[in-house]
Every structure is written in C-alpha cells, then in structure tokens.
Image: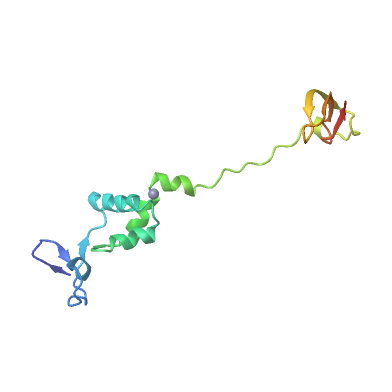
Amino acid sequence: MKLLEDILYHIVTRLTYSGDTDMLTSPIVLPNNEPLILQLIEDTHRINCHAGAQFTFNKLREGNCIIQGRRTVNRVIRKCVICRRFQVKAMECDPSPLPAARIETKQSFETTGVNLAGRSHLKGGKKSLDGNIHLCSFQRGISGHC
Ligand SMILES: [Zn+2]
C-alpha cells in the first residue's frame, strides 16, 4: 500500500507495467465503515438492478479496494428493502378442519341447488334451450332439464 500524490492510499499491484489504466493497476483503498462508502455500495447495487453481492463486489473492485469488501457488500445488500421483499418466504398456516356439514356422507343429489338457466346456445349456434340446472353440492354433479 502506498500513498500517492492524490492523497489516497493505493494498492501497489504487480500489474504496474501492464499498460492498463491506473484505476486497474493501483486501486484505491477505501475504509469499510464510512457512510460514503456504504452509500457507494448501495448506489452500485441499485444502478445494476439490485444485483447480487458477488456482482456488486466485482463492480466495486474496478478501481477500488474496500477493506473487508465482500463482508461489507453483503451487509449493505442484506439491508436493501427491495431485495428483502423478494427473499421473504411465503407465510404458511395450518389448514383449518372442515365443518361438520361438509364431512357428512350423503347420497348424490340429496342436497341440491337449482339454477334457472336462460336461453343457452349450443355449439355451432343451431339449437337453443331453456331449462333448469340442478347442482349437487356434495359431489359437484350437474343435471339439466330442458
Ligand atoms: Zn436491492
């Protein structure tokens, strides 16, 4: 680590003579608990469409070296409200017991309901019917009279 003329600490890498940019060959060392750095992580995370920790960390590494960066990025992303909405498990509840009226054994069409059907058109539009439709509430059967 070396203090350069821009009054920032830079990491001296072995890529000094590679011909790449200075940001790549000597990234800036950033502290991990500064509010500005945490905001930088949040912005990088948000700009990249709420990317995961690994992607955000790699984006930040382009020119920066955050001390304990992976841990810091994970900590910031865990606090992201939008990401937490998608990571929450659905609430589960125990199914309630059925009421006694629905458990009794009955014959088919012992309990029925009647729907008065108006004019209905058959497939093809050739015939039409008026009538009643009897519904069995127990076995979900349907009987029709014209
Ligand atoms: Zn997010």
On the image, the x and y values in percent for residue 4 come to: 11, 66
- Extreme front residue here? 126
- Foreground: 132 or 67? 132
Among the 4 quarters of the image, the one containing residue 118: top right
Q: How is the image coloured?
A: rainbow
**Residue lying farthest to the left in this orientation:** 5
Name, please, the residue furthest toward the right.
107
Q: Is residue 24 left or right of residue 86?
A: left
Q: Who is closer to the viewer here, 93 or 60?
A: 60
- Residue at figure coordinates x 20%, y 71% from the top left: 20
Name the residue: 39% across, 55% down: 51
Q: Is residue 18 above or below residue 121?
A: below
Specify whether 91 is left or right of 109. Answer: left
Question: How many numbered discs sit on the rendered protein?
Answer: 0
Horizontal relation, residue 43 to residue 121: left or right? left
Left or right, 109 with respect to 124, comes to right
Q: Position of residue 26 (x, y in %)?
A: 19, 69
Q: Position of residue 111 (x, y in %)?
A: 86, 27
Residue 75 percent coordinates (x, y): 36, 54
Toward the viewer: 139 or 120?
120
Q: Height in image: 33 above or below 26? A: above
Tell me the quarter of the image containing the C terminus. Answer: top right
Position of 139 relative to 26 (above/below): above
Of the pair 49 and 106, the residue shown nearer to us? 49
Report the quarter where the N terminus lies.
bottom left
Q: Quadrant of residue 130?
A: top right
Q: Image quarter for residue 24? A: bottom left
